[in-house]
């Protein structure tokens, strides 16, 4: 299914389950994809941060994309993360994504390299010119250590270098300005990566959400989104409150693990408990949640009614 012109909705960044020896667990991966599609999501974002993309080599990334495309079989748009430090390496991933059957690519600013805002804009231009797929800008300064400025996003959108933005910057004020700035360009979609404020961001004009927590409960985010589309903000707020309560799973490993480990690790641990994946193993050197932390995750799942 090609990326629609006015793309919108719930597009989870898909968890990549691993075996106990740190290989991709493809039977579990199939279950994850089917779980999300059955949950009513509007697209799949494979090889994002929640997918632990940066831990996978080029051959593994290609295998993950090939598998996702085969299982999805065109049912929803497939977005591929092409995340790497430098422009030409990203373009190489774009070509692989096209060959695998992705419908769009998701691109961050360069990282490790110490580029400025002008060079970052050029990076997106080069990627657009080198890719046969639509380019989505991924604003995640916590990982790449540079924020995509409001002016940079406006420039790229109006030039046609990008078709949308996934905003994981945490700067919701700036995101609201972008919604206003690009109100005359409805073909540019703006999606938040902030799981906890989706109702408010949708009320402010966002086109959708890319929720890591959606791997655990896609139905909840779809219910929230559908309520918002109907203008039923009371129902949207009620669902958001329940999802905020569920989000507490990311704190269960916080005393012993990094922010990334306890976040994705919490999702994986919940998905294991729900029978979606076989293990909650994290890519090394990230720490996997232990049994005590897993019991904390299960307690949260019980409180919100998922088990």
Image (cartoon, grey):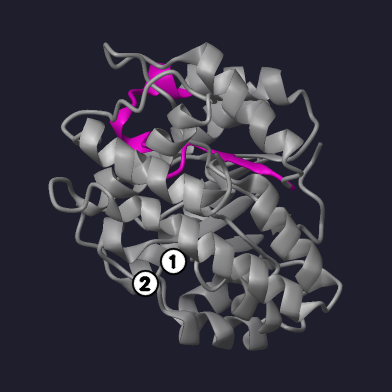
Rendered image quadrant of residue 168 = bottom left
Which residue shows up at 65% across the image and 56% down it? 221
Q: Is residue 29 left or right of residue 289?
A: right
| Residue 50 image position (x, y, % from top left) | 42, 43
| Dot 2 alpha-carbon crowd within 10 angstroms: few under 14, some 14 to 19, many 20 or more | few
Which residue shows up at 73% across the image and 40% down it? 77
Does residue 54 show up magenta in the picture?
A: yes
Which residue shows up at 26% across the image and 43% down it? 261
For the magenta stretch, what is the residue range?
42-61
Give the Cα separation between the discs numbered 2 and 1. 5 Å
Q: Is residue 8 visible?
A: no
Q: Is residue 234 left or right of residue 211?
A: right
Number of the label disc, if any, that sits on residue 118? 2
Q: Quadrant of the C terminus?
A: top right
Judging by the rendered image, the residue that carries numbered circle 1 is: 121
Q: Quadrant of the N terminus?
A: top right
Question: Which element is circle 1 on?
Answer: helix
Kindly check if marks 2 and 1 are in contact, taking CB atoms under 8 A apart as contact. Answer: yes
Vertical side of 278 occupied by 72: above or below:
below
Q: Is residue 234 visible?
A: yes
| Dot 1 alpha-carbon crowd within 10 angstroms: few under 14, some 14 to 19, many 20 or more | many
Does residue 30 show up magenta in the picture?
A: no
């Amino acid at each position: 299914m090609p990326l629609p012109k006015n793309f919108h909705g719930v597009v989870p960044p898909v968890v990549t389950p691993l075996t106990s020896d740190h290989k991709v667990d493809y039977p579990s991966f199939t279950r994850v994809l089917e779980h999300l599609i059955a949950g009513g999501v509007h697209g799949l974002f494979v090889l994002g941060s929640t997918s632990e993309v940066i831990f996978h080599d080029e051959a593994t990334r290609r295998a993950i994309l090939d598998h996702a495309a085969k299982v999805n079989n065109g049912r929803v748009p497939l977005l591929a993360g092409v995340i790497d430090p430098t422009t030409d390496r990203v373009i190489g991933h774009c070509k692989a994504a096209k060959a695998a059957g992705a419908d769009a690519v998701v691109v961050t600013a360069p990282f490790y390299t110490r580029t400025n805002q002008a060079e970052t804009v050029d990076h997106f231009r080069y990627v657009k010119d080198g890719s046969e797929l639509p380019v989505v800008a991924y604003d995640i300064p916590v990982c790449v250590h540079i924020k995509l400025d409001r002016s940079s996003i406006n420039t790229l959108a109006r030039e046609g270098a990008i078709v949308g933005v996934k905003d994981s910057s945490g700067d919701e004020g700036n995101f609201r300005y972008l919604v206003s700035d690009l109100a005359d360009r409805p073909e540019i979609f703006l999606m938040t990566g902030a799981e906890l404020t989706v109702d408010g961001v949708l009320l402010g004009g966002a086109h959708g959400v890319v929720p890591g927590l959606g791997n655990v409960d896609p139905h909840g985010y779809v219910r929230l989104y559908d309520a918002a589309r109907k203008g039923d903000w009371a129902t949207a707020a009620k669902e958001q409150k329940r999802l905020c309560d569920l989000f507490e799973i990311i704190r269960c490993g916080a005393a012993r693990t990094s922010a990334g480990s306890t976040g994705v690790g919490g999702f994986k641990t919940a998905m294991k408990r729900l029978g979606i994946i076989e293990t909650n193993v994290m890519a090394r050197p990230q720490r996997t949640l232990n049994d005590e932390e897993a019991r904390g995750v299960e307690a949260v799942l019980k409180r919100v009614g998922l088990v």
